[in-house]
């Protein structure tokens, strides 16, 4: 697939009623994305702009240069706030169906997080409805190691362990000024040292056919859409050629490579479970201010709470599920008489305990449950931490403890 | 697809006051759902829902074989205060049952001599009453059952009108209150003091349920008596939201209190900091 085809493909998706979202370089405010996020994460906005995931109308708006979007794709899978149902007295009123959403340009780190959502919300009717109405289009460029702490690399053989419908792999060494145009900048590795700005400005002209994106399908939905796209846009000259054929199917074979132990995961889990080192958490507990920003930007933080939102009419309202953070004191609080200075009784009573809970979940509990790490290594948490806690450093401490 | 967050409507058919701030409610499902039958094992819990007050977990305390559900609820916060104001005929939502309940009992062969020691404090007695009422289902004919139960004062003892009947079924009931009270002739002192007064049957397994502060001293007593960690079970309390192992609120180490518990063996918990 080349640039022109991608343009056509996106136009085709729009015609087929998909709302299309992808990474965009923008100076947009968080408020535009979500009032919930804005309330929890005031002004992380950079004057120079940043990569946010926004609704797009043309391929050219996409920024697929391997930079991580500031927020992950999490909120499309697990909305920051969703109504489970509405009620009037004891009558429950079911919620409307999900709309069709296509996510373009999920990098392999963010796709790994989708593996986790798929497992955790396997039996969740709301998630499953949403997921059925989603199209995931992955993209091969990975962020540089600074924000890729496990140094995940794109290789064709990882594709069978990633949950996508369509995957676009950027293969050919891209030529300047042509393919990839704006946004489709070359691999981050060849970019090192040169400011990405120059790349961006050089690529406004759309000339297709110079570089190729290799196309994979990862689901029947992906195959159907590609084939149908071919018919609709009359790509081939004869009828027989019309369907889009230029793709390879990859059968998803689960999130974990069979018979291959992730040694880093095994080591971290062993340290946390069998050799706990409270010092690490006590030290971090002294600096962490429990703002919960890391949990907002983390693609794998999915804790939630359930609350009722009363409406005006008597005994009516909505039961809502919204993101929670294990850094908040209320997270483990239970009913009971308050203790002076300590508030209500709670089970995670110190910052150190709450920090430990967060790390334990990602590096021990999720591995125990699903046999993969609950961290994709994107480093978003380190970027937003106001006191400079760097997950990469903490992991080294755990391993060396 | 089955929606685990949807609750089933039930109505209150009976209320009895147990103590100043504890009431027993009996519920009946209003609209039977074809193909669905509510059932639970002693020790499991349900989520009770009241519009605008959210949901809270409660452990059924009645006889699991009956076609109604009994909950014994202490008034302590928003939802429970609202429930305490409700009357017969009022409706609630219920979902569940969740958790493992007393299934660990299933692994024991009570025919070949295992006895049961129940140690409970305050409201902790609630789920264990279900076990007592349904004991023939879980225990052997010959199983000796002992109950060590403590409350702050005599009039806070739950189900106190039923003890005589239980004694007739060969259940040994030993009671204690925290402080001297006029008219109380029984033991005075916290629950662990009952261990100094009464002998525990050889070859017993123990179930403990009560306020977390009593767990350590009771564990000490049980260990001194030679109980192995695998034969000691305790019920954990945690804040809960989903009830089935997703929201993370109730996680303890690699376990979820809602899904893998609320009843755990001490062998499972002893190496987890902060578990009790
Ligand atoms: C497995 C289990 C079984 C229980 N069984 C009983 C029982 O049989 N009888 C009884 O009286 N109580 C029982 N509890 C405790 C009961 O759930 C709480 O007292 C109740 O949730 C308090 O709700 P509230 O709205 O009145 O209190 P608030 O203080 O107003 O509660 C506010 C919020 O905290 C949550 N919450 C508060 N305390 C607890 C808690 N202890 N556990 C879980 N969530 C909590 C509530 O769900 C609610 O979302 C049980 C708890 C658990 C975990
Ligand atoms: S209550 Fe949600 S995980 Fe246990």
Image (spheres, grey):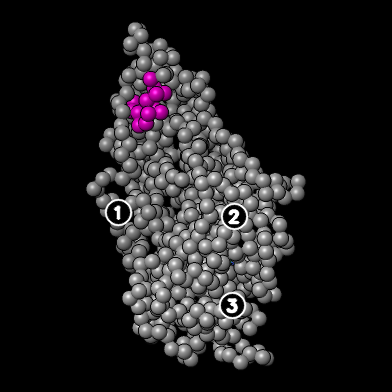
Q: Mark 3, chain letter? A: B
Whether ligand 1 has any atom under 8 Å from the Cβ at mark 3 is answered as no
Dots 2 and 1: beta carbons under 8 Å?
Answer: no
Give ligand 1's quarter of the image.
bottom right
* A96 lies left or right of A7: right
- Is label 3 or label 1 in front? 3
Percent position (x, y) of residue A191?
35, 34
Residue A294 visible in the current orientation: no
Q: Quadrant of residue A216?
A: top left
Percent position (x, y) of residue A28?
57, 35
Q: Mark 2, chain letter? A: B
**3D distance between C-alphas at marks 3 and 1:** 57 Å
User: For the point 70% across and 46% down, which residue is it?
Assistant: A88
Q: Which residue is more in the foreground, B170 or A228?
A: B170
Residue B162's tag is: 3
**3D distance between C-alphas at marks 2 and 1:** 43 Å
- Is label 2 or label 3 in front? 3
Q: Which residue is more in the foreground, B183 or A338?
A: B183
**3D distance between C-alphas at marks 2 and 3:** 27 Å
| Residue under pointer 2 | B94
Name of the residue lying farthest toward the right: A313
Discs 2 and 1 carry the same chain letter: no
Percent position (x, y) of residue B217?
47, 82
| Residue under pointer 1 | A264
Percent position (x, y) of residue A117?
44, 44
* B251 lies left or right of A180: right
The magenta segment: A214-227
Residue A216 magenta = yes
Mark 1 lies on a secondary structure that is helix
The 10 Å Cα crowd at callout 3, few under 14, some 14 to 19, many 20 or more, is: few
Vertical relation: A265 (above or below) B160: above
- Earlier sequence position, callout 2 versus callout 3: 2
């Amino acid at each position: 697939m080349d640039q022109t085809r991608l343009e056509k493909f996106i136009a085709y998706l729009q015609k087929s009623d998909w709302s299309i979202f992808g990474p965009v370089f923008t100076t947009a405010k968080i408020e535009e994305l979500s009032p919930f996020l804005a309330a929890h994460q005031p002004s992380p906005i950079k004057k120079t702009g940043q990569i946010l995931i926004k609704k797009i109308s043309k391929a050219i708006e996409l920024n697929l240069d391997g930079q991580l979007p500031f927020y992950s794709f999490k909120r499309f899978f697990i909305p920051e706030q969703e109504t489970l149902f509405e009620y009037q007295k004891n009558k429950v009123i079911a919620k409307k169906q999900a709309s069709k959403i296509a996510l373009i340009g999920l990098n392999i780190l963010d796709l790994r997080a989708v593996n986790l959502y798929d497992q955790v919300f396997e039996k969740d009717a709301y998630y499953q409805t949403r997921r059925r109405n989603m199209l995931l289009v992955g993209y091969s460029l990975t962020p540089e190691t600074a924000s890729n702490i496990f140094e995940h690399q794109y290789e064709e053989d990882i594709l069978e362990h990633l949950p996508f419908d369509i995957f676009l792999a950027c293969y050919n060494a891209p030529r300047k000024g042509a393919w990839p145009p704006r946004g489709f900048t070359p691999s981050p590795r060849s970019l090192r040292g040169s400011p990405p700005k120059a790349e961006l400005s050089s690529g406004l002209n759309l000339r297709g056919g110079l570089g190729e994106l290799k196309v994979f399908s990862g689901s029947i939905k992906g195959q159907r859409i590609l084939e149908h796209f071919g018919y609709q846009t009359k790509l081939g000259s004869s009828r027989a050629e019309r369907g889009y054929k230029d793709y390879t199917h990859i059968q998803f074979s689960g999130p974990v490579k069979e018979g291959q132990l992730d040694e880093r995961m095994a080591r971290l889990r062993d340290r946390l479970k069998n050799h706990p080192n409270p010092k690490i958490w006590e030290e971090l507990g002294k600096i962490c201010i429990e703002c919960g920003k890391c949990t907002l930007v983390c693609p794998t933080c999915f804790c939630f709470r359930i609350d009722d939102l009363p409406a005006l009419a008597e005994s009516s309202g909505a039961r809502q599920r919204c993101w929670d953070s294990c850094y908040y004191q209320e997270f483990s609080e239970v009913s009971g008489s308050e203790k002076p200075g300590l508030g209500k009784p709670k089970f995670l009573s110190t910052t150190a305990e709450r920090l430990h809970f967060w790390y334990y979940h990602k590096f021990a509990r999720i591995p125990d449950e699903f046999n993969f790490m609950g961290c994709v290594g994107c480093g978003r948490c380190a970027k937003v931490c106001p006191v400079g806690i760097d997950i990469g450093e903490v992991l080294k401490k755990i391993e060396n403890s | 697809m089955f929606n685990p967050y949807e609750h089933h409507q039930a109505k209150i058919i009976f209320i009895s006051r147990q103590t100043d701030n504890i009431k027993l409610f009996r519920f009946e499902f209003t609209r039977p759902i074809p193909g669905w039958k509510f059932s639970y094992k002693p020790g499991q819990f349900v989520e009770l829902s009241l519009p605008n007050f959210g949901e809270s977990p409660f452990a059924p305390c009645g006889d699991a074989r009956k076609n109604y559900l009994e909950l014994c609820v202490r008034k302590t916060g928003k939802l429970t205060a609202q429930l305490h104001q409700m009357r017969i005929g009022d409706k609630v939502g219920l979902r569940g049952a969740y958790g493992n309940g007393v299934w660990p009992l299933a692994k024991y062969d009570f025919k070949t001599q295992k006895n049961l020691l129940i140690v409970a404090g305050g409201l902790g007695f609630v789920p264990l009453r279900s076990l007592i009422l349904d004991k023939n289902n879980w225990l052997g004919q010959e199983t000796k059952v002992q109950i060590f139960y403590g409350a702050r004062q005599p009039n806070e003892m739950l189900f106190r009108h039923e003890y005589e009947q239980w004694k007739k079924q060969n259940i040994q009931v030993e009671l204690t209150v925290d402080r001297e009270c006029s008219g109380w002739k029984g033991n005075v002192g916290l629950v662990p003091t009952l261990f100094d007064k009464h002998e525990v049957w050889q070859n017993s397994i123990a179930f403990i349920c009560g306020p977390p502060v009593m767990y350590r001293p009771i564990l000490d007593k049980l260990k001194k008596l030679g109980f192995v960690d695998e034969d000691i079970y305790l019920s954990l309390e945690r804040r809960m939201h989903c009830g089935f192992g997703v929201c993370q609120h109730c996680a303890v180490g690699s376990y979820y209190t809602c899904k893998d518990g609320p009843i755990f063996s001490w062998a499972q918990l002893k190496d987890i900091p902060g578990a009790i």
